[in-house]
Image (cartoon, rainbow, N blue to C red):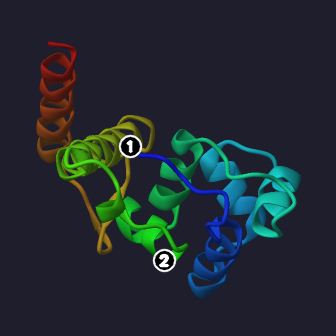
Amino acid sequence: MKLSKDLKIGSNIKKLRKERRIKLVDLANSVGISNSYLSQIENGHKPIPSLKVLEKISLSLHVPFHQFIEEAGGNFSDNSPDDGEAEREHNQEVELSNFLEISDYLRYFPDITCDGVVIPKRIKDQILDFSKYLMTKEKD
C-alpha cells in the first residue's frame, strides 16, 4: 500500500487519541516512539511515519488499520487488486499480535483479571500453550 503525502494522518491520530482520552505520552510509549516525535507527527511537522509505526498507532488506538487510513483520507480501493488479500493478512497479523500481547500479560502479571475476576491458572496455561502453537505455525 502506498501512502499519499496529503493524508491527514497527524490530525487523525490527534483526533482519535483525544476521543479516547489517551495522553500523548501514553500513546508514544505504547508505540515505542518519543513524545516529541508523536507531537510533531500530530501537528504535521513530520512526514508520514513508516507503515510499521502507523500499524502500532492504530493498534494502540484500537482502530482497524483500514479505518485508520480511510479516516485520514486514504482509500484502500485505489490500490492494486491484491489489497483485499493484503488487508486480510494485515488483520490476521494484528489479531496474532493482540493475542501474543495478552499472553505476555499473562506471563508477567500472575493476578491479571478479566471483568474483575482473576483468570484461573488453567485458562492462562491454555492461552500460553495456544500462543506457542501460533508462533510455531507462523514460522512455517
Name the secondary structure under disc 2. Answer: helix
- Circle on res. 101: 1
* Camera-nearest residue between 121 and 133: 133
| Residue depicted at x 21% and y 33% | 128
Q: Position of residue 135 (x, y in %)?
A: 22, 23
Farthest top residue in view: 140
Where does the image place residue 138, in percent across and percent down from the top left?
19, 22
Q: Residue at x 47, y 65 (%)?
A: 69
Residue 3 pos. (x, y %): 54, 52
Q: Looking at the picture, which amino acid does disc 1 mark?
A: Glu
Taking depth in this image into account, of 37 and 79 the one nearest to the observer is: 79
Mark 1 or mark 2: name the one nearer the start of the chain. Answer: 2
State the CA–CA distance, disc 1 to disc 2: 26 Å
| Residue 101 location (% of width, % of height) | 38, 43
Relative to residue 60, is residue 5 drawn left or right? right
Query: Can the viewer see residue 74 in this picture?
Result: yes
**Residue at the bottom extreme?**
19
